[in-house]
């Protein structure tokens, strides 16, 4: 069983990976495994990113030790996952993922329970805990550049696919037959978009070609897993580019079918709002500020929400809440939307009409609202896209800096959003003042109906 192709090797002197750039926890875990007689390799994104001179997001470790053996070596170790059993080892403040080499099952140790489940109609791998050699493990990974191993035994980098070459050409290439590999796990299509965006890599033609046809396979992925991917796609600094890749590859419409971003028919308002939200999230990540999925969810689903609101039979408060819940329910069938996120998104939405107030008392109350900041940031996004809201956003910007006694004069002047008399300049949010009459004339597609002002 051990007749394996020799890997391409880069010895210690031939590559740029320095141990100083590997986290202390990862080094400790690898040395402990090594000293206990097991193999220990840094693998995946960490090796890729270190070779590119970047800062790895996390350090994953691969070993020939079985999960139970890993558990016995580390005091702070938990085995998690069913689809893939992974050991989480806590070391100082870090959590390291340690995985046992996955195998193909062919020629596996007969004492090993073969724990793999495949959906035969789609080729989807439901569970995969067949263990194997390092070489087999490499070939089961997704992209060649993600199948590079760095060992503490000799500090060499090993490559069983064409990872080093593809890294040089800045290219993502699936290992093996692309269609088979996408069918095994359709999330790899999202990973292609995400890693391409994050690394600035292109996707190899043979890898990209089947995506258009296989994109609908994403519909079978559990919503909780898509939420994980959603966060990795949009909250780590390359959100806007990831979004562009998803749209280009026609994957986005499978994550959020209700938004209806469709490059052919075009829904420019939603597209612009989503981009603006992602650009602002990326800037926050770059500045080391906190980011929340709730804000993005508010931006992503604003247009479907406005659409729903426009078709409400009556404008009762509860009806708006129901509309929000219906939008979350529908979107949640694809990407799970936990309450803790959707609740905040809903509050952001519900505060929007309150920004239109001309009452100093109400303005003061709104300034004290616990969700004021997020709601104001959202108003700013809308104002960037929809100039009629600019004076409103400007007033609230000033409201946050003026002395409390100046709030009165600031809000007594009537600053209603300016309506474009021709009704055409703004295709997004139109403003609420003359809501009832304007609603009928709203274009059916782009322009969200206003939410009621106080
Ligand atoms: P990031 O920089 O975002 O962490 P990554 O490539 O390290 O990127 P992870 O999700 O941390 O992504 O996965 C670690 C490694 O596990 C990958 O590099 C790849 O080798 C392997 N892997 C992850 N997801 C899959 C998958 N769906 N199919 C095959 N291999 C995968
Ligand atoms: Mg990683």
Image (spheres, rainbow, N blue to C red):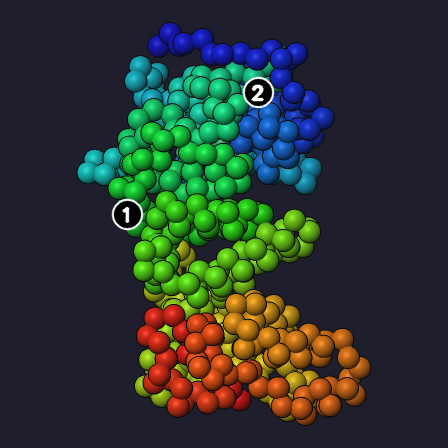
Seen at 52% across and 16% down, the residue is 158
Q: Which of the 4 image quarters holds residue 153?
A: top right
Seen at 31% across and 14% down, the residue is 107
Give 348 or 252, whichever is nearer the viewer.
Answer: 252
Give 431 or 52, whichever is nearer the viewer.
Answer: 431
Rendered location of residue 143, percent (x, y)? 43, 29
Give 440 or 322, whichever is nearer the viewer.
Answer: 440
Q: Is residue 77 left or right of residue 165?
A: right
Give the labeled residue for mark 2: 150
Seen at 52% across and 37% down, the residue is 200
Q: Residues at badges 2 and 1 in contact (C-beta under 8 Å)?
A: no
In the depicted structure, whether residue 305 falls above or below residue 190: below
Rendered location of residue 445, percent (x, y)? 34, 71
Rendered location of residue 317, percent (x, y)? 44, 85
Is the distance from the Cβ of mark 2 to the nearest ligand 1 atom less than 8 Å?
no
Q: Nearer the viewer, mark 2 or mark 1?
A: 1
Res. 135 visible in picture: yes
Rendered location of residue 328, percent (x, y)? 40, 66
Q: Which of the 4 image quarters holds residue 327?
A: bottom left
Crowdedness near tag 1: few (<14), some (14–19) or many (≥20) residues, C-alpha within 10 Å = some
Give the labeled residue for mark 1: 216
Crowdedness near tag 2: few (<14), some (14–19) or many (≥20) residues, C-alpha within 10 Å = many
Give 177 or 380, whichever is nearer the viewer.
Answer: 380
């Amino acid at each position: 069983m051990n007749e394996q192709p020799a890997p391409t090797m880069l010895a210690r002197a031939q590559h740029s990976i320095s141990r100083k750039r590997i986290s202390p926890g990862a080094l400790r875990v690898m040395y402990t495994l090594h000293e206990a007689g097991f193999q220990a390799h840094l693998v995946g994104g960490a090796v890729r990113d270190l070779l590119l001179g970047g800062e790895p997001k996390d350090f994953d470790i691969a070993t020939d030790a079985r999960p139970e053996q890993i558990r016995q070596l580390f005091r702070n170790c938990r085995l998690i996952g069913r689809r893939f059993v992974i050991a989480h080892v806590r070391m100082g403040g870090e959590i390291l993922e340690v995985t046992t080499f996955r195998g193909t099952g062919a020629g596996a140790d007969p004492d090993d329970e073969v724990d793999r489940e495949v959906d035969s109609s789609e080729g989807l791998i439901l569970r995969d805990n067949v263990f194997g050699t390092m070489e087999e493990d490499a070939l089961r990974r997704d992209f060649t550049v993600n199948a590079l191993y760095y060992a503490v035994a000799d500090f060499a980098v090993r490559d069983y696919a064409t990872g080093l070459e593809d890294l040089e050409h800045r290219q993502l290439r699936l290992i093996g037959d692309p269609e088979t590999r996408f069918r095994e796990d359709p999330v790899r299509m999202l990973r292609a978009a995400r890693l391409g965006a994050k690394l600035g890599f292109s996707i190899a033609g043979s890898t990209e070609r089947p995506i258009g046809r296989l994109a609908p396979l994403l519909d079978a992925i559990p919503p909780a897993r898509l939420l994980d991917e959603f966060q990795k796609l949009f909250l780590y600094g390359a959100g806007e580019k990831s979004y562009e890749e998803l749209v280009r590859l026609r994957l986005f419409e499978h994550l959020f079918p209700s938004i209806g971003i469709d490059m052919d028919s075009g829904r420019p308002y939603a597209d612009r709002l989503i981009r603006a939200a992602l650009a602002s999230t990326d800037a926050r990540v770059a500045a080391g500020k906190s980011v929340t999925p709730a804000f993005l969810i508010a931006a992503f689903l604003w247009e479907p929400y406005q659409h729903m609101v426009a078709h409400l039979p009556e404008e009762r408060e509860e009806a708006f809440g129901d509309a929000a819940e219906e939008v979350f329910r529908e979107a949640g069938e694809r990407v799970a939307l936990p309450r803790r996120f959707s609740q905040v998104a809903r509050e952001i939405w519900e505060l929007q009409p309150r920004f239109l107030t001309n009452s100093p008392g109400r303005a003061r109350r709104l300034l004290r609202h616990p969700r004021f900041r997020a709601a104001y940031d959202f108003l700013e996004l809308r104002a960037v896209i929809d100039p009629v809201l600019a004076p409103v956003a400007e007033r609230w910007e000033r409201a946050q800096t003026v002395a409390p006694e100046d709030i009165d004069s600031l809000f007594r002047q009537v600053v209603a959003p300016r309506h474009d008399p021709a009704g055409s300049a703004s295709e997004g949010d139109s403003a609420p003042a003359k809501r009832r009459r304007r609603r009928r004339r709203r274009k059916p597609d782009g322009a969200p109906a206003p939410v009621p002002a106080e």
